[in-house]
Image (tube, helix red, strand yellow):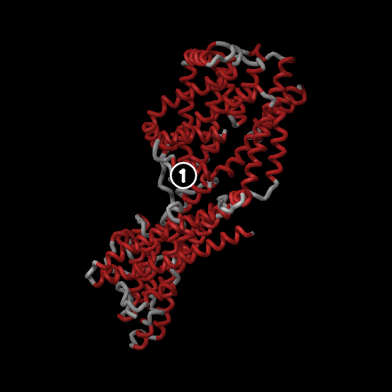
Amino acid sequence: MSGKSNFQKFREFLSKDYRDQLKKRDKLIEMLRRMREKQHELEAERAGESHADVQESLDMQIRLLREQRRKGIELLRELRELRRQTRQD
Amino acid sequence: MFRNLPLIVALALLGWAFWSSETVAEIASGVAVFLFGMMALEQGLRSLTGGTLERLLRLSTDRLWKGLTFGASATALTQSSTLVSLLTISFLSSGLLGLQQGLGVIFGANLGTTTGAWLMAGPALHFNIGRGALPILTFGVVFILTRHTTLRSVGWVLVGIGFLFLGIQWMKDGFDAFQQAFDLTAWGMTGLKGLAIYTGIGILATVVMQSSHATLILTITALAAGQISYENALAISIGANIGTAVSTGLAAITANIEGRRLAGAHLLFNVVTAAVALTLITPFMLTVEFLAGLVGLAEDNHAVRLAIFHTLFNLAGIGIMVPLIPTMVKVLERVFRSKPAPASKPRYIGDTVAKVPGPAMEAARKELLRLFGRIFTVIATSLNYEPAQLRANSDRRQLIAPPERVRAHDLDALYQDRVKPLHGLIVDFLARVPVEGERARQLVVLRTTSQRLLEAVKDTKHLQKNLVRYLRSSNTGIRGEYLQIRANLGELLNRLDALSQEPGEDLELSLGELAARVEGNDIVTNGHLDQLIRDRAITAEQATSLMNDSAYAYRIANNLIAAARAIFLPFERMDAELREELALESGELRDILQSPDASDRQHGGHAP
């Protein structure tokens, strides 16, 4: 039992906004997954790098990715909250 | 006046027929209601299944058989080859589908239309479908009055089906009454003459009614009422096939090159198929009889025999034409050549593609990429770089080298000639795309992007005034600063151009790095301007100019990066709206640059 009534499911099916939110959430999750993988990749590369200039460039990329991921996670939270509100309305 | 003469004659004839005979009026009303039903059904299905059909078509682009299957099943499901053709032309125009795959879809759609004859010859003739029409219509109208988009679309579909049923019933009733008053079989013809004349009637009826389905249902009901002979009905069905292609061809006169190629292929397919059917009509009829015997079809059931014949000769057409598709593609590309689009003409956007949201968005994105290319040229020229060289050269030392000759270019003329007309067309196109929900938000992103690109050109115009002046200056301090601004923008343009060709998987990261570089190079915030003033390397007046121009360069760079974020990747691969939401703001970038472990990050730019 998911706790969702059939009426609720039907309403969600009819709501384009709700379907759009789900689609956006899925895309964001996929995007965050790829960013995390890239960050791990760069961190591994950074650990084995001895050249200072390259280290610096990798550091910058890692910091950028961290910040972008932080924003993404915040956005994901907002989307979750918005969906909860849509359901209550 | 003379252009409208055929319409006036047709209306006069119709008026006379209505006045002189009630049964003719009933048949004509049946056809009109049937056609209206087709329109309502198409409208409903377009909004109900538009997204699904688009997604399915995207999945059918890699193999010919998939295209054929999609064309046949989508047309059978929607009973509208017009809808499938429109979708295919839109996909072709936006480059989401190749001509070869497009031909597969159109050939499949031809087979799909034959299911219409089956539906009409089967259930439609044997049940009193008119009785079911009114409740369906009532439910349909109730659904149309609701607020939900999906239910409204379902409503249009129901109204369409209701009117189709009603139209068929009226035609049946009309022919039943007609049978008692007139005998049309007296006009029946046999032999070659009959084939030729009735094929012509099929073509004419389909072109006039703009629907092969309407011609077929009229033929099937007349055949069931015994008003025309079986052989003449077969000839009409062949004519109906050619008539559809003629209608598509007429509509494609105003379409873009892809639309014309597809219409050409459609016409060729139907003419060849019709020629084969007319030449081999006797073997086809014998095959129909053989198949009818296999399933134990009644001797007088000519309507189903007609449906079998219709399917058989279209299948034969596919069998003949599919192996010829690669040759057809070559011929069509030679006959309908795409000329290089002039500065004021768009390459991807147009009236046809504007009707289907997915391909329309992709076409607009590609057109914006084209605009980006032009803006690259305009900005590079104004910075006194040779655009082709700037595209190929990413070496900072060469970018910072002073130009051999400093020229002030007429940016207004370049803007009016290369940017403004295309920008106007894109804005006009975006206003006509029917979108809602997520796609509406994506459309806003595209519109904002076109504006950003325009602003980048306007800021370049302001920047150029002092850039030219100080690049010619003998004061090495100020000259060096403007060479830095020029090189920073040149480097950015070079990098963005490379990313526009190959965005890669990490576009967001690459753009983030570029944005961080722009932030670090901003001499107003990184303290370099203050240092120049303190060192008296430049005068107060020069400092003001430098401050303003640095702000212009900063805006140009940020607008170009934001545009790149929105248009360098198709929407399907990554959502532009999401990319915009995740983009780091200038304050966030500065925090990263000022974090304790961040040392000097300026890439050849100004030291803070």
Question: Which residue extends farthest left?
Answer: A50
- Compared across the picture, whether B123 is left or right of B390 comes to right
**Quadrant in the picture for the N terminus of chain B:** top right
* Residue found at the far front of this picture: A1
Whole-percent x, y for residue B483 in the image: 32, 73
What residue is pinned by disc 1? B93
Residue type at mark 1: give it.
Ser
Quarter of the image for residue B605 reads bottom left
Label 1: state its secondary structure. Answer: helix
Report the number of discs: 1
**Is residue B479 visible to the viewer in this orientation of the structure?**
no
Quarter of the image for the C terminus of chain B: give it: bottom left
Q: Position of residue B100 (x, y in %)?
A: 40, 36
Pick whichever, B218 or B426, lies toward us: B218
Asked whether B101 or B591 is in front, the reply is B591
Q: Is residue B14 visible?
A: yes
Asked if residue B562 is positioned above or below residue B425 in the image, the reply reads below
Residue B545 coordinates in the image, percent (x, y): 42, 79
Which chain contains the residue that carries disc 1? Answer: B
x, y percent for residue B496 = 36, 61
The residue depicted at 65 percent of the width and 22 percent of the height is: B126
Q: Is residue A86 above or below residue B273?
A: below
**Looking at the rendering, which quadrant does residue B488 occupy?**
bottom left
Q: Residue at x 46, y 16 (%)?
A: B280
Pick whichever, B319 or B370, lies toward us: B319
